[in-house]
Image (spheres, grey):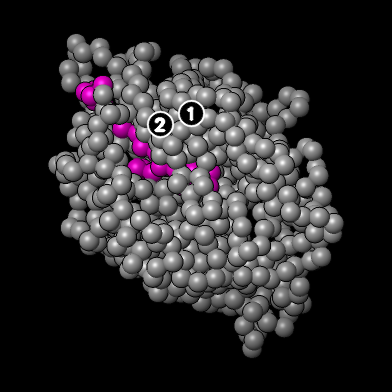
Amino acid sequence: MQNDEHLPPPGRALLRGISIFLSIGFWLGPATPDSLAVAPARCADRIPERRALFGDLHVHTSLSSDAYVFGTRTRPDDAYRFASGAGAAEMSVVTQGGLVQSMARIPRPLDFAAITDHAEMIAGPAVCTTPGNVGYDSEVCRQFRAPWKPFDTLDEGVAIIVALLDALNSETVCGEGGVRGKRCLEGMATAWQEIQDSAARFDAPCDFTTFVAYEYSSNPEMSKVHRNVIFRNAQVPALPVSSRIVPHEIGLWKSLAAECSHAGTGCDALTIPHNPNLSNGRAFALDYGGASSIEEQREIARLRDSFESLVEIFQIKGDSECRNELEGILGGPDELCDFEKYRAPFRGPIEDCGEGVGGGALLGRGCFTRRDFARYAIARGLAEEERIGVNPFKVGFIGSTDIHEGLPGDTEDWVRDGIQRPQRTNSFGADNPGGLAAVWAEENTRESIFEALRRRETFATSGPRMRLRLFGGWDLPEDLCEMPDLAARGYASGVAMGSDLPRRPDASTDRRAPTFVTSALADPGSPGHPGGLLQRLQIVKMTSDAAGHAVQRVIDVAGGATDAYVEAATCEPRGSGAASLCAIWSDPDFDPAERAAYYARIIENPSCRSYTRACLNLEGADRPAACDDESIRRYAQERAWSSPIWYAP
């Protein structure tokens, strides 16, 4: 079949629908199980057994002041045009010679995207970039509009940004009342309307989906406690909720309940935390806002669960799945937990927060704790459900980019518009263009994708477009991997990722363990850019013991060849690998009295990091120092994570 990426949107949708039915029956199958009854189809290529759609739900444009000050001039329209493949977008590249503007085009369009500019950072830029505004000629605004100036250290850069952002919310810019001042509230409303209008213009049901969204960005003591707020449809509150006005996430959820989900307008929203790895123990803390009674804690846990069905497990600021050497974790180390750490693995003991919290992670400082990582939050949620009857951390997984250049899904490591360039590198040298959010949905519409997000039938990738499925049940066929209608049988006989296992057929006498089928297809890549082969498929089991420790077990269920490597001089992959992997696994240590959660993880063969590939062709003044820094890892093993399946006695 011909490459569809150069066709106009309707042609792409048609060819994608045809190719799905002709080439991946293994994933779909002909049946239509009763469990998949949903709203009437809007799209001719609707698939009851659902297909994988890839997107980016964490993107910043020049509406965010932190993106603007570093040269980004991309607006929401430009970002959606880029993501959908409808055209090129301007991007900012910081080189040794300064800031360079160029055009970029996405090699493979996304299926969906959301612009998530910071609620705290969209008011001031609107004031400072609108000639004639009372604050436009202030010294703060002149500094804001000045050309980007490089800085030498992370501390210096963060200090510059924090000082500028504080100034942008001052009375000088906002008027009387500072962040609540008339000029900044009007500026926020103007930016919020642009975000909504742009999403409406580019939403193209059945081909490309947009979501109205923003980011709630709280930074207590320089820790990162941020959430993206994604709305189901065009019914949204009048203004975003800013952490400068509502400083705690409980207030965010209560505001969304009052102004959205309980307002009777058809508004609905999800909040998706990201970068718990930089939260110094705050992301998955259980302080309940000071509530002491079990009933009060239960109500807050229910409130959280009603909005927070997902966590962004991977993005440009690193991996938030797991980390070795933390306190309160049993089951031994996981050799694959050192992947893409924003704060590099320590050579000495890790400073652990214990049951407390710290600060300074945005500066690369402060303590870690298991409450900074999604895997251990899953276990903590099991323990908390045992204690109060509600699981506050029943979260599925997605990835995204958090890109501040307005280029959704810019995760490809190869040539762009004939030019190779080093990708973004963080202040600790890790090179990582970000991840993608993936959903299993019947069709490419807001309704279908939002429902997939809500029910957690999602998976995260570190950038490639591999496809990962997980089903669990009590009566899955032992030869399910050989069946062409795997998905239909998985839905009919069990549950998909993000779900609870149903009650055992006869809980009083049946001692059987649940069975899981997990399947993965490698990223097919694109012409001239083959995807990587798969190395191993794993299931991760999480439980919690009576003392509240997280208990982890990582099981290889398929693949496992380890002879793969990369040619250093060319970045060519070598060694064995698989285009697809599938396995049936039954838990030999299953205890019917113990709560547990299971998720799948697929690991690719090693590949060059994006900057390594770019460095092959850079010489002299064009060659950044990172190209010759031996402390920076040259290669990575890309991966994907499914949302868990939960079991409760």
The residue at which mark 2 appears reads as: 581
Q: Residue 179 in the image: x percent, y percent? A: 60, 68
- Residue 555 visible (yes or no): yes
Magenta stretch, residue numbers: 455-478
User: Split into 4 quadrants, where in the image is the C terminus?
Assistant: top left
Instruction: Decide which of 245, 20 is in the foreground and name it.
Output: 20
Mark 1 is surrounded, within 10 Å at the Cα level, by few (under 14), some (14 to 19) or many (20 or more) other residues, namely: many
Residue depicted at 29% across the width and 56% down the height: 17
Q: Is residue 281 left or right of residue 474?
A: right
Vertical placement of 419 versus 389: above or below?
below
The residue at which mark 1 appears reads as: 536
Residue depicted at 46% across the width and 44% down the height: 523
Q: Secondary structure at mark 1?
A: strand
Q: Residue 615 in the image: x percent, y percent? A: 74, 50
Count of numbered circles in the view: 2
Vertical placement of 132 versus 253: above or below?
below
Amino acid type, label 1: Arg
Mark 2 touches mark 1? (CB < 8 Å): yes
Q: Secondary structure at mark 2?
A: strand
Q: Residue 254 in the image: x percent, y percent? A: 41, 53
Amino acid type, label 2: Leu
- The quadrant in which residue 10 appears is bottom left
Residue depicted at 81% across the width and 44% down the height: 628
Instruction: Decide which of 261, 312 is in the foreground and name it.
Output: 312
